[in-house]
Image: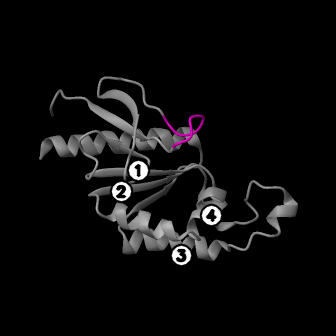
Amino acid sequence: MSDEKFLIIRDTREKPDHGWSFDPDAYCQGTIIDKVSTGDYTIFGLEDYICVERKQSIDEFAHNCIEKRWQKCMQRMSECKFKFILFEFSWDDVNSYPASAKVPKRVRNKLRIPAKYIRKVINTARYDYDIHVIACNDRYTAERTAYRILKKAHELHVRR
């Protein structure tokens, strides 16, 4: 393997208090903030090779499921060799939506997106666009998973 370290790019649209930031280590130069055309995270120089989309909450993802732009996002992601959607929540949150929504009860009763539809969107991502969807349960696990994915993609690219 090469001694070359990889540099992670975090999209400018990730909110400052949210998302992940990777510190420099033996393999990684750290994180820069720049516009990413596909996903929220990628590797500098490998933007067409690897992309990672982060979803902070089931509420955010449920809303994405009904947006027309989500289909375009999945289409763009499908053009990368390695593509992932990482949830900072669990499969239980998906399966029990809208009960798992982090909104006041009076608002929760008005949510009209059933868990069945959310699962259909996830299956579309998986089977129609070949996107890996991983429920990591929490932010820390999702961030560590993203790092391992990005590191592995870099290693595979260097070996080519």
Question: Pointer 1: what residue?
Answer: 52
Question: Pointer 4: what residue?
Answer: 63
Q: Residue furthest top?
A: 25
CB of mark 1 within 8 Å of CB of mark 4?
no
CB of mark 3 within 8 Å of CB of mark 4?
no
Amino acid marked by disc 4: His
Q: Secondary structure at mark 3?
A: helix
Side of 146 where 154 appears, left or right: left
Dot 1 or dot 3, earlier in sequence: 1
CB of mark 1 within 8 Å of CB of mark 2?
yes
Q: Which residues are magenta?
A: 14-20
- Mark 3 against mark 4, which lies toward the viewer? 4
Question: Pointer 3: what residue?
Answer: 120
Question: Pointer 2: what residue?
Answer: 83
Q: Secondary structure at mark 4?
A: helix
Q: CA distance from mark 3 to mark 2?
A: 18 Å
Amino acid marked by disc 3: Lys
Amino acid marked by disc 2: Lys
| Quarter occupied by residue 158 | top left
